[in-house]
Amino acid sequence: MNDTADDKQLILLIAQKDSNALELLYDRYERVIYSFAYQIVKDSMAAEEVMQELFLRVWKNAEQIDFGRGKLLTWMFAVTRNLAIDHLRKRSSRLPQQSADSGNLDMIQDHTALTEDLVELQMAGEQIRDALLGLSRDQQQVMDMIYYQGYTQQEVANLAAIPLGTVKGRVRLAMKQLHKSLRHWGRRDHAHE
């Protein structure tokens, strides 16, 4: 198997418990998924946990992924967003229980990260930021409210005073454009290694 297999082929192989296919999928999307998770949780360890949970779900549920409902990357972004928001909710429910003397371990910066990892993270963030800047202002607003602020599509429609169908259309077009902008990014990076 080579790294030119499309996402659908990889998912079919993962459904048959082909670990090489999962590794190829991981290599293809790890950076963009990590960066997306990090944008939400603002913590490197939490972003790593969210990313690992996503790929565990891909491994366990590959046979249930329905390509008729959209692209794999769209599904991965949606699951990552949900996992990241769940992580934030769990973390915020734990914070009030900490004593004032214990300090907030979440606020201590991890100084053990390698410079190379930080550079890769910055590159991933820049790639996603560039892709998001390629969206229309309306699409950026909707994507920000849904994926970074945690609003539902219905809540966005209510807050922005626009029809729900318009919100759904903007999300669909934005995800299509983001997928087009980001789909070859991971493979390009690995091709030079």
Image (spheres, helix red, strand yellow):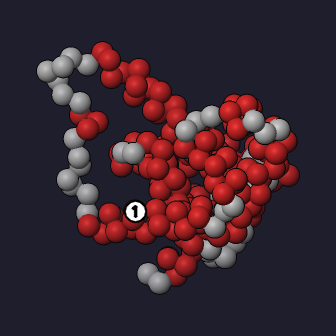
In the rendered view, tell whether residue 147 sits above or below residue 112.
above
Q: For mark 1, does the 10 Å Cα neighbourhood hold few (<14), some (14 to 19), or many (20 or more) residues?
A: some
When the figure is inspected, residue 91 is found, relative to residue 2, above or below; the finding is above
For the point 23% across and 49% down, the residue is 110
Which structural element holds mark 1?
helix
Q: Residue at x 28, y 36 (%)?
A: 106
Image height check: is 29 above or below 159? Answer: below
x and y, in percent, of residue 162 in the image? 78, 39
User: Residue 91: x, y in percent?
Assistant: 39, 28
Q: Residue furthest left?
A: 101
- Residue lying furthest bottom in this view? 192
Amino acid at pointer 1: Leu
Task: Evaluate whether residue 87 shows in this view.
Answer: yes
For the N terminus, give its image quadrant. Answer: bottom right
Q: Quadrant of residue 121?
A: bottom left
Q: Residue at (50%, 76%) from the top-left corner? A: 190
Q: Nearer the viewer, residue 56 or 33?
A: 33
Q: Is residue 9 left or right of residue 104?
A: right
Q: Position of residue 94 (x, y in %)?
A: 36, 21
Residue at (54, 63) in percent of width and height: 128
Query: Residue at the front extreme?
Result: 161
In this image, 89 relative to 151: left or right? Answer: left
Please give the residue where the numbered disc 1 appears in the rendered image. Answer: 121
In this view of the protein, which residue sits in the foreground, 3 or 90?
Answer: 90
- Residue 10 seen anywhere in this rendered image of the structure: no
Q: Does 167 sit left or right of 116 as displayed?
A: right
The picture places residue 17, in percent across and down from the top left corner, at: 64, 52
